[in-house]
Amino acid sequence: MSDIRNIVVLTGAGVSAESGIATFRGPGGLWEGHRVEDVCTPEALAADPDLVHRFYDLRRAALSSVRPNPAHEALARLDRAWAGGLLIVTQNVDDLHERAGATRMLHMHGALRQALCAACGARFAWADALPPATPCPACAAPALRPDIVFFGEIPYQMERIEAALAQADLFVSIGTSGAVYPAAGFVRLADAYGARTLELNLDRSEGSDWFDESRLGPAGTLVPQWVEQMLNA
Ligand code: APR
């Protein structure tokens, strides 16, 4: 691993599972209790804003009772200690990476503790409930919504992500099912750019065949092991 300088890490719901945040797919997953099209599309927001806002209010409120786990902590340790390039791209809307101390990171699917004005595009840190038609502190339009990338919307910072993938020597995917694009396609993009690819996941994902290596197990165990391996190489 001593030839590795630039790393891109992609994380999904599995990295936060051991903190007690439900994943999306599979038994007990968030999408078992809710239809995606009822709570996570622009059409749903327009048709039933109360339901959509309540769904995200509950998820935002739940953040106050969870904590980063050893996987988040290990990635924050890597962020502090890794002298080469690093970008942690999370699909998660929780704030556990940053609470663990990671800074070289971005939220490609948005963030629960952020509100977005649909009228002027301003963003605000938001810790409490966000009722529909809340006025924007910047432009006063009654248009604040959760800053979540819904299905059918374009994920954030794609140019920055693609630039990092083009420079990556190593791409590591952690705790994601590989079911949702464009994130699910990053492994093939990284591979095409010449990066080595590694998956750390509880079980085989839809993209496992695309990785040079898949390590199966809980993120809270596998991620600290991998980070130690990188920092001691
Ligand atoms: N450690 C590692 N992996 C785990 C753990 C764990 N403790 N627990 C579960 N996993 C794995 C599961 O095996 C699964 O492959 O994490 C993955 C979670 O998959 P999903 O629930 O599909 O979550 P994710 O891949 O993040 O979903 C992608 O879908 O609905 C959208 O926008 C939402 O960002 C989300 C996107």
Image (cartoon, rainbow, N blue to C red):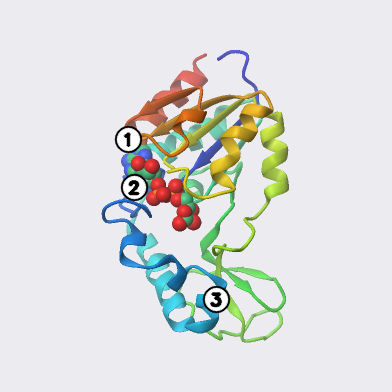
Which residue position holds label 2?
17
| Image height of 65 relative to 13, above or below | below
Q: Secondary structure at mark 3?
A: helix
30 vs 184, left or right, is left
- Mark 1 or mark 2, earlier in chain: 2
Mark 3 Cα-neighbour bin, 10 Å: few <14, some 14–19, many ≥20? some
Quarter of the image for the N terminus: give it.
top right
Residue at (43% x, 41% y) in the render = 72
Which residue position holds label 3?
43
Q: Amino acid at mark 3?
A: Glu
Give the CA distance from mark 3 to mark 1: 36 Å
The x, y position of residue 145, in whole percent, is 56, 75
Q: Amino acid at mark 2?
A: Ala
Residue at (56% x, 45% y) in the render = 183
Q: Secondary structure at mark 2?
A: helix
| Image height of 230 relative to 223, above or below | above
Residue at (71% x, 32% y) in the render = 166
The x, y position of residue 125, in whole percent, is 57, 66
- Mark 3 or mark 1, earlier in chain: 3
Q: Is residue 94 visible in this depiction of the protein?
A: no
Give the CA distance from mark 3 to mark 2: 29 Å
Q: Amino acid at mark 1?
A: Pro
Residue 22: which quarter of the image? bottom left
Give the CA distance from mark 1 to mark 2: 9 Å
The x, y position of residue 67, in whole percent, is 36, 50
Cβ of mark 1 under 8 A from ligand 1: yes
Of tags 3 and 2, the one toward the viewer is 3
Cβ of mark 2 under 8 A from ligand 1: yes
Badge 3 vs badge 1, beta-carbon distance below 8 Å = no
Which residue position holds label 1?
218
Badge 1 vs badge 2, beta-carbon distance below 8 Å = yes
| Image height of 96 relative to 116, above or below | above
